[in-house]
Image: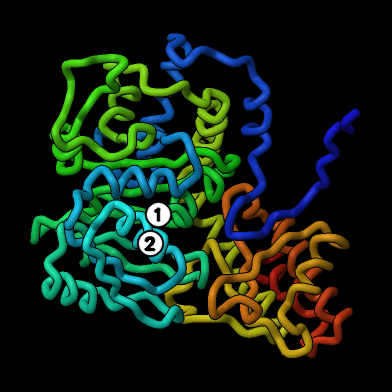
Amino acid sequence: MFSELVIPRRTIMTPGPVEAHPNVLRVMSSTILGQFDPAFLTIMDAVKEMIKIPFGTKNEQAFAIDGTSRSGLEAALIALIEPGDKVLIPVYGRFAYLLGEICERAKADVKYLEKEWTEPFDQEVIIKAIDDFQPKIVTMVHGETANGQMQALDKIGAACRERDIFFVVDMVATYGGVPIYVDEWKVDMAIGGTQKCVSVPSGMSLITYNDRVEKVLTSRYQKELGLSKVDRNDNPISSNYLDLSQLQRYWNSERINHHTEATTMIYALHEGLRAMINEGIENVWARHQLNDDAIVAGIQAMGLGFFGNMATKMPTVTPILIPEGADDGEAIRSMLLEVFGVEIASSFGDLKGKVWRIGNMGYSSRRENVLHVLGALEAALIYYGAEITKGEATKAALQVYEV
């Protein structure tokens, strides 16, 4: 016999996943609808329109892709790439290399523009690299969770548009948490995810793209052979499952039978987006910023340092330098989880063992969570003998909240 699941309660303060909104969990237990049930199609249509708001776009195309965030990244890039296409990837953290891996597997000619992970690029540096390399596509990360840094995009997007280059941006860690203006920044294709600021479990990726991209998709459209022996193409998108040209037609009025939709996840996405939009997207951004200010104040009050340029730090992730006396930080992370029920993250590559990351995303971005993580971290550091300023962290955060 197998035992019934007993799931421990956690305060999740990582850069993803985050705590799901209670309304999201509620609707996920609702009755299953068929994917072509008129009631379900109405839900899909509402989701399409809500996805656009945090992206800051009026694009006609905006929908969800079954799969975690990287399913959207892969779908976006393989839709545009043909073997030999030149792709420029500016790298200031881990996840730009994921974009590169996708492009390399699609047989693109990839050029990495690399720098130290301490801060994002001066946009003019990227524009110069664009002129030198003359790519078909520029793809990069808006907010890097590995180091908590956020890249300005407005000049890059404008330069790409002037040169007829596609600009594809990973906005997974910023979607819903910070101001995003896809249209104003001239981003051709943007990708988000459910498991961060949308407060929905991992399992769907969100995408929007403009008419420039849609023309490419139309030119590569091929309907599945079991549905049509006529709609064939000499240059189809290489994946069937992640074929945006078909997914678009499932989400739009044609409603082709591409896959069996994860209806429960669409319910969840509907409620996560609805909660965000009803709060007011500007209010959501302000909440994330306020809680970030409180986290930063508390960490500073303990006497701990930060990794990277604080002027370009994203409000949704705070990278903290692990202090002397805490070794690689794993014992303290274990105590936070096992004793206090709080989860924070380590980092990657050269930053592993040197940096902790506190996430501040979605439903996890709440005052009680901020105060809990600060109090628990201070207690764990004291227990392990790290030299910090005691008794000031939560006080400093409370002063930010003006309680």
Q: Residue 295, can we see it?
A: no
Q: Position of residue 190 (x, y in %)?
A: 33, 49
Q: Position of residue 336 (x, y in %)?
A: 80, 65
Residue assigned mark 1: 171
Q: Residues within 10 Å of mark 2 (few under 14, many from 20)?
A: many
Residue assigned mark 2: 142
On the image, which quarter does residue 232 sit in?
A: top left
Label tally: 2
- Viewer-proximal residue, 155 or 261? 261
Residue 296 lies left or right of residue 263; in this view the side is right
Quick one: SS at disc 2? loop
Q: Residue 37, can we see it?
A: yes
Q: Position of residue 76 (x, y in %)?
A: 31, 46
> Image point 74% across, 54% down: which residue?
11
Residue type of the residue flagged with mark 2: His
**Which of marks 1 and 2 precedes in the sequence?**
2
On the image, which quarter does residue 116 sit in?
A: bottom left
On the image, which quarter does residue 46 sit in?
A: top left
